[in-house]
Amino acid sequence: MTSAADIRSVLSVPEPTPGSSQQIKKPVATNKRPQGISRELYELIGDSVPSVVPQQSKARLKLKPNLGSGPPRSRWEWREFRNGARTDGLRLSHWVKAGADPDAAYPFEHYNVVSNPYRYTEEEYAQLLEDPEWSKEETDYLFQMIEDYDSRFLVIHDRYEFPGGVLRSLEDLKDRYYSICRRLVRNRPWNGDESSRSKILGLLAFEKERELTRKQYLRSLENRTPEQIAEEEALYLELKRLEQTERQFKKDRDDLLRTLLGIESGLSDIQLSDDSTLHGLNTMPEIKKSKKRIGSSMEIDSPSTPSNSMIQQRRIPIVKNAAFDAQHCITRIDLPQTTVTKSSHQAAALRSYKIPTPKQAVATKVAQTLSEHGVNSSRLVMPTRENLLHLESLIEATTLLLETKKNVDRVEQDIRFMKAKVLRRDGQLGGEGGEVPMEVDQEAVADDDDVGIHSGRGARKKNARRSMSMSSVDTAAQAGRSNKRQKQG
Amino acid sequence: MVQYGGDEVAALVVDIGSSTLRAGYAGDDTPKAIIPTYYGYKSQPPDADVSMSGIGDDPSAHNSRIAKMFVGQDGPSIYREGMEVGNPMKEGLIEDFNPITPLIRHALEDVMCIRPADHPILVTEPAWNTPANRERMAEIIFEEFNAPAFYIANTSVLNAFAAGKGSALVIDIGHSEASVTPVIDGFVLRKGLVHSSLPALVHKRAKHVLTQPDQNRRGINLLPHQLVANKAPVDPGFEPQFNVREDRLQGITKSWRNWAENREASEWIHSVASVLDQGWNEQAVAARGARQYEFPTGYNYHFGAERFEIGELFFAHPQHLQAANPNLPKSLPQLISASVTSCEPDIRQVLLSNVVLGGGGSLFAGLADRLNNELNRIFNHAKIHAPGNPAERRYGSWLGGSILASLGTFHQLWISKEEWQEHGRPIVGQRCK
């Protein structure tokens, strides 16, 4: 039965002042609906309240917002304050809550972080730090600049103007500073253990030559003309085509050998040829070209040569390369062996251009999840190879986490629905058998989780089903860990 | 309040540009007072004929003769008999400090109705400002306005801050100067700083194109509306029918006339001129169509190709212009390449992915799109940040100053009056790096 109070609450009409209208309606509320007439019909014909209530209370001009019932107003004062980060007595004023402690330290004081650069004494300079290239005055000037600009070498290099000094490059400045720091750390008495000292020395390491070479590479990369880039792409396609023909040729040769010689020609040859192409792809183009010439010429000259010698010859440069790579920090990557198109070609580029981004559809969600975990994914300070991998896996893990979450939500909803269904059936039948559909569902959950988490690194096939313990919580922890690594790197 | 890092101390931000002077409270999103930097003045009667002949050539000489100054919105724009018009700025720098005090005073006291002595004041400067200039500015703020604290910040850095970036390549196109500045961690890299008076060239060229006759129309009379008594509507391209206010014609000075005609030319630029987004192309010009514009004399015309020719000057100079004078100001792509190549290769990518476009001149129709295309033609991976809100673009440097001066961590950087009195001028260079 609809009462006037209900309608009022629905329409959010204020309670009328106790008066005539209340008294008129009272008997209506007590009226009972006669049997046999539906409620809807009765409300239309019966003496119930009309669907639109006429405003019977005194008309108000305008509803004023109620400002009194909110939280109590607080008083603010325009008050002078002392900034502890200042060396003088400047007193500026700002608004503070009236009750605030007038002697409290300025809240922004502690952001005034003073960096603590290395300093040397006269003695130390005379003993350790003499350098024919640098005068004591200029070294002092450099250290003063580093202090003034908080070791921002780019800015220091820009502003560096030592009167009468020679023109210094950024690397010169860095080299001088870091070499002094290293010498100081090495020769000063050390309080901590050796590992912490070597760690600090590692942080202060700076190789000028390598830095210069790196910059030179960067420059040459930037200075490529469009023609050169186009040529690079054309060469890549040409290379791929050659490779394909070679593979085809090899296959034909093997087929031929097998038909002619039977098992003696060796099935291993097939295996090996695959192997060698793989290695060929892993190495730099220049090395590869020369190698291929050797290989192919041999093949043409003596097709029946046992392939063992060939392997031997091929393996040697690769082993050499490994040492060479380790020395020069070169990492070789597996190029995808897909069809040769222009789009599959990856031109030389800076790694910072290759920062992975989540898929468009889930990008905002991923960013949100990451920020919930306190991860700033938008800014990768040092995009090294490892960091990019970490970031990629982080994003992948997050995407999967979100997917899993979605699945879990769905399945939970299903379970709830099923449970309700079972309960209803229980009520009707009062029996068992309600558990069966639920178990099936749980199986489904486990399945989802499992596949979801392990498919990340393309190991979907290998992975046998794991237990259910690999839950979404675990994924989150994994995401957090890989992020930490990314920051350190 | 603390979580946003803001702590407002009722600081003022004063941003002096070649066209307008902006002043307002730090923490606001637009300046409260925007007054023209151009000012009107009347010379003392005995020297009147001298200053008529040569204006702006020797500011210190003619300023001693100023009898009365007219600043603010109704300063130069109102006709007054014998009024000259001056501008203290030259190539983005303050050249003549005498009118600066009245201009700032007008903005703060008359427009904002405040007492400057109660507020710390942050003033802006272009990146190529001289140490003497900034010290002079500090002196004015401390000695004449008696402010408790002062700071001078760089417009390029502030433009980057307004865009929310600490490191950026700032392209600032103003009223008379265009500059490209690399900013790293809030510091200008001076070696990469380049600027040229490109907007002034565009303006001059526009005025030249308008006033010179071509094969389709006569040269246009840029008479300002202050000198037009009445006019009759005429068809596009026909001879205007209007009457000049003969009574005023006698009283105007050469500098005022020049200022007024320049204003008509810039109005034309703002309403009609545009730049094509993919370089000069006759067909594209024809496709974009002509646009009608009416001058104060009543003369009106459909401007077609010429409205695009003007904008093209920002990006390339035509052959005949280059032949006529060899040292034209550098075009925008030239400026940008010069700036980027003088930076370390390491930071080029950082700069190019954070290009910030600012300044009122960048509101030239189509300029942002064209610049984006040009940038992507020279460098790959360039990303341009150009605020869509015109106020944010025009007052970018003021806005950055407003953000900076309302930060709680900034208040330790102010040069206080006490420090000024103790250390004198060198403190400005030490504090404001």
Image (cartoon, rainbow, N blue to C red):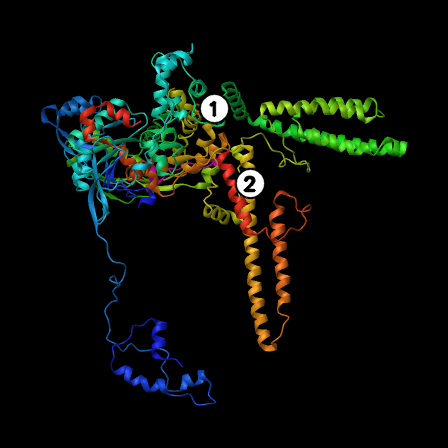
As drawn, the label of residue A201 is 1
Q: Is residue A380 above or below residue B316?
A: below
Give the Cα separation between the discs numbered 2 and 1.
Answer: 31 Å
Q: What amino acid is at disc 1?
A: Leu
Report crowding for label 2: few under 14, some 14 to 19, many 20 or more residues within 10 A (C-alpha): some
Question: Quick one: quadrant of the C terminus of chain B?
Answer: top left
Residue B309 versus residue A455 in the image, above or below: above
Report if residue B278 lies within the magenta region: yes
**Residue A353 within the segment the image draws in magenta:** no
Element type where label 2 sits in the image: helix
Can the viewer see residue B245 in this picture? no
> x, y percentage for residue B232?
26, 44
Q: Left or right: B101 with respect to A345?
A: left
Residue toward you, B424 or B182: B424
Residue B225 falls in image quadrant: top left
Label 2, on which residue?
A392
The secondary structure that most of the magenta stretch takes on is loop
Q: Secondary structure at mark 1?
A: helix
Callout 2 amino acid:
Glu
Question: Residue under mark 2: which chain is it in?
Answer: A
Q: Earlier in the sequence, mark 2 or mark 1?
A: 1
Above or below: residue B28 compared with residue A301: below
Relative height, residue B131 to residue A278 (above, below): above
Q: Nearer the viewer, residue A17 or B399?
A: A17
Q: Is residue B353 left or right of residue A88?
A: right
Q: Are marks 2 and 1 in contact (CB under 8 Å)?
A: no
Q: Which residues are magenta?
A: B268-282
Q: Estimate the x, y position of residue A226 in percent, counting from the top left.
A: 56, 27
**Of the pair A135 and B31, the residue shown nearer to us:** A135
Disc number for residue B127 = none
Label 1 CA crowd tier, 10 Å (few <14, some 14–19, many 20+): some
